[in-house]
Image (cartoon, grey):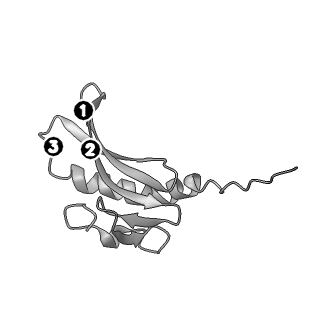
Amino acid sequence: MIVRVQSKPDNFPLILDESRFLLRHLKQMHNKGIEGFQHRIEFVLVKGNTYHKIIKQFRNKQTLELASLTKLHGYIDNKGNLYNDRKMIRGNIHLPERGINCLSHDGYLL
């Protein structure tokens, strides 16, 4: 007996490419006005099965080492929908505004 198993296509490379603009914009918004702070803030996308996590990381400006503190900022699903940390849909990265319209003035997903 032959069993055929269909695997889901891996959309993560496309999602990562489409989310680069949003991640760069988040980094600029969160690093604005914190020149005296010893860490700079970075955002990365971590692959998941259905939801990919947007993680906020802190990097030391002098040593460039990552701090152990990370914070979940939101999610992006395989269709490009943006979710806040409570998994409420807030936007889509495939639309022309690339998800920027769903950010608050201080860079958080509404």
Image quarter (top left, top right, bottom left or bottom right) of the C terminus? bottom left
Which tag is nearer the camera, tag 2 or tag 1? Answer: 2
Q: Which residue is mark 1?
A: 61
Task: Give the mark count.
Answer: 3
Task: Give the residue at the far right of this rendering.
Answer: 1
Pointer 2 or 1: first along the chain:
2
Q: Secondary structure at mark 2?
A: strand
- Identify the residue position indicated by label 3 in the image: 35
Picture layout, residue 75 above or below residue 67 = below
Which is more toward the observer, 43 or 9? Answer: 9
Q: Amino acid at mark 2?
A: Ile
Point 52% across, 58% down: residue: 15
Q: Position of residue 89 (x, y in %)?
A: 37, 70
Q: Gap between marks 3 and 1, in whole Å?
A: 10 Å
The furthest residue to the top: 63
* Classed neighbour count for the residue bearing mark 1: other residues with Cα under 10 Å, few (<14), some (14–19), many (≥20): few
Query: Looking at the rendered structure, which numbered label has been put on residue 41?
Result: 2
Question: What type is the residue that disc 3 sits on?
Answer: Glu
The Cα–Cα distance between marks 2 and 3, rounded to whole angstroms, is 11 Å
* Disc nearest the viewer among 2 and 3: 2
Residue 105: numbered disc:
none
Specify the amino acid type for callout 1: Lys
- Looking at the rendered structure, the secondary structure element under dot 1 is loop
Q: Position of residue 98 (x, y in %)?
A: 43, 68
Q: Residue at x 30, y 49 (%)?
A: 72
Who's the residue at 25% across and 61% down the image?
108
- Quadrant of the rendered structure where residue 84 is? bottom left
Residue 27 locus on image (x, y percent)? 30, 51
